[in-house]
Structure formats: C-alpha cells, structure tokens
Image (cartoon, rainbow, N blue to C red):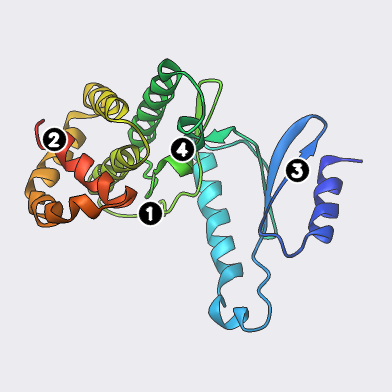
Amino acid sequence: MTFTEYVDILQALHPEKRVHRFDFEGQSYWLKQPEQSQGSQRLLKPFSTQAFKQEIQRIKWLMLQKAQIPEVKIINNHCLVMEDAGRTVRSLLESDLSEHQKLRILDDCVKALIRLHEQNIVHGRPLLKDILWQNGKVSFIDFEVASHSPNKKWQKIRDSILFIYGVCCETSPKQIQHTIETFSRYADSHIWQGLLYLIKKYRFIYYFLLPFKPFARKDLMGIYALFENLLTK
C-alpha cells in the first residue's frame, strides 16, 4: 500500500476529524482536512472549506519561500499531510528537561524567528504552542498572516512582542531574561528598537493594570513580565 492510498483510507475512516495523527512505516504524520460541520454548526461555521483552501494557499506560499515549517507530504484542497516535527515548545518547557536544555530550545526559537523575519515572512502569532522543536530543528505551525500583508516591519515587531509575551507567560524569570538577551543580540536592530519603542509608548497599560497584579492569572502575569523586563532596556 502506498502512502497516498493509506491517507485516502484514513480520510474515509475519519471524515469528521479535522486533525488526525498517524504513523506510516515508522514515521509520524499529521493529517488535516476541512472541518465537516453538522446540523446547526453549518450555520455557525459556514466558511470552513473556504478557510481550509486559504490555509492551503498559505502553506504553498511558505513552501516556495522555504520557510521553517514541517515537511509537507500531501497538499491539495481536500487534505494536508505533514511530517511530525516534534513537540510544542510549551510542552517541552513544562517537561523534566534540564534548565540547560530548555535555554537551548529557547535560543533555537529566537534564532528561528529572526531567520523567518529575514526571509520577510511574518507568522502572526508565534506563541510557544505554535512552535515545534526536535533535535535542534525549529518548525512553525498555524501561521496567521497572509503572504501579501502590508507593512512587514510593523508585523515583525508585533511578531517579536508576541513571541516574548508567550515566553513571559510560560517560563521562569531566568528563562525570560535569557530569551530577551538572546533576542537583543541577534535581532535586526530596527526591529529591536521598534519593539522597545512600542513597549515604552504603551507603558501606561502596565501602570493601569498594576493594581490587579495580586489577583492576576497566567495571561495577565505575562503582560506584567513583558513590561517589567523590557522597560529597563
């Protein structure tokens, strides 16, 4: 049985599964297909097929740009199959890996995001749950910005802030500081200075939210950490 034939069988067996992980000849893969809405869900999600086609076009563009994404094995308007490219960085940082290994993973992520921006590619939401790591290789998934988006400099700055914010939400103070130092060392100076400018421009948000700090949960604590670590730069 060929790989394509096996995927056809999986689609027939699991038409309702939008995302399905499977193994074939010792390698793990992810199958993604349009969401099959039922009943009232068709009214709530009428454009799921169109959204999937748009995602396919985005992936094809990323492939042409040689972006850091998992290897694509099958791509068409009915399904997308990619190789498994490892665990999410968020799950790795929650694991029992050593502190040295976790810092290395964060370094790899910083450098990978900078390389992505050097290719003039913007992710749109590079949080740690949307970044995969395996044996030193970083892959990005779930891009949210179309290839034709205008004002790339602003979007790269926004990407960078969201990435650091994600680190602030998920990691320790030491890991946050290490990540920011690595970013400041390797990032394009215009992006880094633009990032600092925006943080300082909107620092009133930090002071407005400060009274709520004793009651804050993870997402809000990430905002505090973002400002506290960058306002001093």
Residue type at mark 4 is Arg
- SS class of the residue under badge 3? strand
- According to the image, label 1 marks what residue? 148
Residue for point 23% across, 23% down:
181
Residue for point 14% across, 44% down:
199
Q: Is residue 44 visible?
A: yes
The reply to whether the C-beta atoms of the residues labelled 4 and 3 are less than 8 Å apart is: no
**Label 4 crowd (10 A; few <14 / some 14-19 / many >=20):** many
Label 4 to label 1, Cα distance in Å? 29 Å
Q: Nearer the viewer, mark 2 or mark 3?
A: 3
Where residue 63 sits, quadrant-wise, is top right
Q: Position of residue 144 (x, y in %)?
A: 42, 54
The reply to whether the C-beta atoms of the residues labelled 2 and 3 are less than 8 Å apart is: no
The label shown at residue 140 is: none
- SS class of the residue under badge 2? helix
- According to the image, label 2 marks what residue? 193
Label 4 to label 2, Cα distance in Å? 27 Å
Residue type at mark 3 is Phe
Residue type at mark 2 is Gln
Q: Nearer the viewer, mark 2 or mark 1?
A: 2
Query: Tag 2 or tag 4, which sits nearer the N-term?
Result: 4
Q: Report the number of numbered marks.
A: 4
Q: In the image, 81: left or right of 176?
A: right
- According to the image, label 3 marks what residue? 22
User: 98 and 115: which one is in front?
Assistant: 98
Q: Position of residue 138 (x, y in %)?
A: 49, 29
Q: Is residue 75 visible?
A: no
Query: Tag 3 or tag 4, which sits nearer the N-term?
Result: 3
Label 4 to label 3, Cα distance in Å? 22 Å
